[in-house]
Amino acid sequence: MVLRRHCLALAILFSLISFPVSAEQGTSLSLLPVPRSVTMKEGRFRLTPSFTIAIKRDAGPRLYNAASRVLRRLSGRTGLFFPQDYVTGEIFPDTASCVVTAGRKGDVVLGEDESYTLLVTPKVVLLESKTDLGAIHGLETMLQLLNVDDEGYYLPAIVIQDAPRFPWRGLMMDVARHFMPIDVIKRNLDAMAAVKMNVFHWHLSEDQGFRIESKVFPELNKLGSDGMFYTQDQVRDILAYAEERGIRVYPEFDIPGHSTSWFVSHPELASAPGPYTIERHWGVFDPTFDPTKEATYEFFDKFLAEMTALFPDPYFHIGGDENNGKQWKANPAIQAYMKQHNIPDGHALQAMFNKRILAMLTKYDKHMIGWDEILHPDLPKESIIHSWRGQKGLFDAARKGYQTILSNGYYIDLIQPAEFHYLNDPLPVDSLKVLSENEQKRILGGEATSWAELVTWENVDSRIWPRTSAIAERLWSSAEVRDVEDMYRRIADESFRLEELGLTHRKNHDMMVRRLVNNGSVTALKTLLQYIEPVKIYARHSQGVSYTSSSPYTRVVDAALPEAMAARHFRIIVKEYLSTKETTLADEIAGICNTWKQNHSLLLPTIRKSPVLKEIEPLSSNLEVLGSVATDALEHLRGGASLSAETALRYRVAVELAKKPYGQTQLMMVDAVADLLTAAAAPKK
């Protein structure tokens, strides 16, 4: 067991004689996020039943617990019966297979050192970090290195030196519009840790619900939650669970707007008289706190004292978005106050409110965060601007001296592809042209945002994962790591790995499909689902369905995945075929189109037995039509003949009709069929 008694620095120095690969080339290993530096070595470390993990320096129980979880996951993947039940100080570094050395216990705070170095040789695995947080990240990387050959399981010999690009890599979960049980929160925390995300933003209040127990104002959760809220003991449990995984947790209470649920119990604080009831619909609503009443601030001082004591993280989100100001304009007393105090408009009035709240949070040792609407010339620079409306606002805030985080482009509820999120960078490579180095440092990172109008506990995982893995990489890895196709390869691998953590993004999809077919045959519906996605952005709210918090979120649109990978594959091979005319691609396209042509007749009996599927019958019919159009176009291309003008026109009409959504879903490869048609209709030279 050579190297074990040598310092890791010497081992790394020795490794430099090996051929280094770039971070981009290192992606062939299916690492996600891509590490900062990867150096491949000769040989493989073989996993055997004698594999053990030792902690060389005691950095606290968190690292022992993390190593134990990794050991169990490694055992679960390989089926090997390792001798350790738990990683403890009883296994000595001189005899262990994997030796972890962390300098100290890290603080789960913004800016803590998360770097690590991982060395795998044919003899031993050495992981070294300045803090246990870095070691936890390194253990996740080790798990991602696991591979298999004819001899069994192994880790490739390698040296990885890694550290994050941004210190703020977050996921926001809205649990107020649709409540999310504790097990949903915990499994998503596990997924975050697996892809090295380190901030959980907990959106706890909305018009539709107030989701946390208040002992100071117990009527808030009793009357404003429909009984669905987290007790303070449950909150502490989540905080401890996250801290064990190196994840900060900070709350959001959205004020002064988005506040109907508060006024069910406290109508006297609203800007218009009650009574109020919990809002059941989605949208932007009028109820808003009255910022001219001292009673409002007396209430918040007590409430914030309670909540800041519960949440130890130094950051506290006040929302501040989408206040339409209608109640303020309609209230004569508020208008008179504004006139008396020379407050010109609602934005300035909200700025006054924000400053009062900021003073309270500062008193309780918290930094205030708000959505970018809070930005105002009077806003103190201690506040953090959370940009949801665009990168321009992010840069403007940084220039004005504010620290910022980006969520614009990371709204995963808008059902946009992973590629869109992946190429959205808080600091694009050319950002030095518009921001100084100091201004760039004010951009802390970003957060994926999972708003919950259209998700429930049943499908929320499929709306977050695996696309959020792409965002995690964007916030960790170098800006130059931008190979979209390789990203898709690796998030597919990560999607598989996340299942061992209990994520239900695949499992619940299958469950929902079985329900839709009334426990009948799922084959034909699953074929259709491979090529459809929910409509994008907020289109579901404008397509004839009035959603409420109690609506059924069990239809095809809810089971359909945000990104139909089979449709994406079809688009890619059509593009490649039109460029190369390769026979194998033509054969593959023909086979896919033949499946489309047959599927509608197979699905019709299922639709008759399951009326819930009736709304997507036109999509199924259009899939059949597209199969026929694409087949004919392909045959003409292969035969060197052009489609007649009459046939081409008829096909174009059919293709255009196939773009229409049904049941708030749409076919996602129509443009590729249109491209085949255009090529087949072009005059041949």
Image (spheres, grey):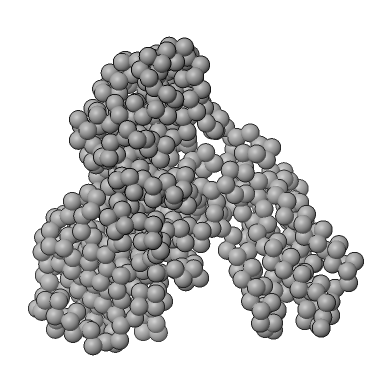
User: In this view of the protein, can residue 233 be seen by the observer?
Assistant: no
Residue 396 placement, left or right of 12: right
The x and y percentages for residue 458 are: 50, 45
Residue at the spot 72% in from the left edge and 68% down from the top edge: 675
Between residue 423 and residue 42, name the one nearer to us: 423
Q: Is 62 located above or below residue 674 in the figure?
A: above
Q: Is 194 located above or below residue 24 in the figure?
A: above
Which quadrant of the figure contains the C terminus? bottom right
The x and y percentages for residue 627 are: 76, 66
Residue at the spot 67% in from the left edge and 53% down from the top edge: 666
Residue 201 placement, left or right of 237: right
Count of marks overlaid on the render: 0
User: In this view of the protein, can residue 60 be seen by the observer?
Assistant: yes
The quarter of the displayed image where residue 240 is located:
top left
The x and y percentages for residue 164 are: 29, 62
Residue at the spot 39% in from the left edge and 69% down from the top edge: 480
Which quadrant of the figure contains the N terminus? bottom left
Residue 684 placement, left or right of 241: right
Residue at the spot 48% in from the left edge and 25% down from the top edge: 325
Q: Is 270 located above or below residue 5 in the figure?
A: above
Q: Is 249 located above or below residue 489 in the figure?
A: above
The x and y percentages for residue 283 are: 54, 33
